[in-house]
């Protein structure tokens, strides 16, 4: 199943045991090294000890809620080494700038598309930062085009983006 990352935020997590409420998703923890959704940060978290549920413990995704065994799958973020490392880096995906390898600003990552079976981010939805503002076209960038993700930006390959810009430029020339 494919789902947008922002649609997971604030979703309830319910138990397969009795359908009881386990918690609510506060944020997504995505490994910037490989684009994998590692865990879901819980709303019950304290500032000092965030609580998480690893994606391996999520048994199902529905349009209304997520399903996990019970609240025994909730743990402190620092109990899972890779999750702790990712949180310590403080790298944003949603809300991060997106630019090409040459530094051309493309916009801000507004959302992501996640394959819930593999927990991999497969697309990045980018709100354009062009001079035309709302009139400029937004981009959908496949994860295969991502070169790196760091605190400063999501860096994508030049090719593919240039083609879209070239098409827009030739359309503008025809209109003039």
Image (tube, rainbow, N blue to C red):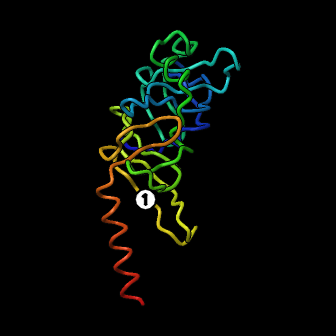
Observer-nearest of 98 and 47: 98
Q: Residue furthest front?
A: 102
Provide the secondary structure element on which disc 1 rests: strand
Q: Which residue appears at 47% of the width and 67% of the height?
A: 137
User: Quadrant where the C terminus lies?
Assistant: bottom left
Q: Residue furthest right?
A: 47
Q: Position of residue 124 (x, y in %)?
A: 42, 48
Residue 44 is left or right of residue 30, and the answer is right
Q: Which residue appears at 68% of the width and 22% of the height?
A: 44
40 over 46 or under it: above or below: below
Q: Which residue appears at 50% of the width and 32% of the height?
A: 66
Observer-nearest of 51 and 140: 140
Observer-nearest of 101 and 60: 101
- Classify 10 Å Cα crowding around label 1: few (below 14), some (14-19), many (20 and above): some
Query: Total label count?
Result: 1
Write down the quadrant of residue 26 in the picture: top right
Q: Position of residue 155 (x, y in %)?
A: 41, 44
Observer-nearest of 40 and 103: 103
16 over 167 or under it: above or below: above
Q: Residue furthest bottom?
A: 176
Q: Position of residue 125 (x, y in %)?
A: 46, 52
4 over 105 or under it: above or below: above
Q: Which residue appears at 51% of the width and 14% of the height?
A: 73
User: Quadrant where the N terminus lies?
Assistant: top left
Q: Which residue is mark 1?
A: 139
């Amino acid at each position: 199943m494919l789902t947008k990352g922002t649609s997971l935020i604030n979703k309830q997590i319910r138990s397969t045991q009795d359908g009881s409420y386990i918690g609510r998703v506060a944020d997504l923890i995505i490994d910037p090294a490989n684009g994998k959704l590692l865990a879901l940060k819980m709303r019950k978290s304290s500032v000092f000890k965030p609580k998480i549920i690893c994606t391996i413990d999520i048994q199902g995704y529905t349009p209304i809620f997520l399903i996990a065994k019970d609240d025994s799958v909730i743990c402190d973020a620092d109990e899972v080494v890779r999750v702790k490392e990712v949180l310590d880096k403080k790298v944003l995906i949603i809300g991060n700038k997106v630019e090409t390898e040459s530094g051309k600003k493309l916009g801000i990552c507004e959302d992501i598309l996640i394959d819930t079976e593999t927990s991999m981010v497969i697309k990045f939805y980018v709100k354009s930062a062009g001079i035309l503002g709302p009139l400029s076209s937004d981009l959908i960038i496949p994860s295969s085009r991502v070169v790196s993700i760091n605190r400063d930006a999501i860096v994508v390959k030049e090719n593919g983006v240039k083609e879209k810009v070239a098409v827009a430029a030739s359309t503008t020339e025809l209109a003039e």
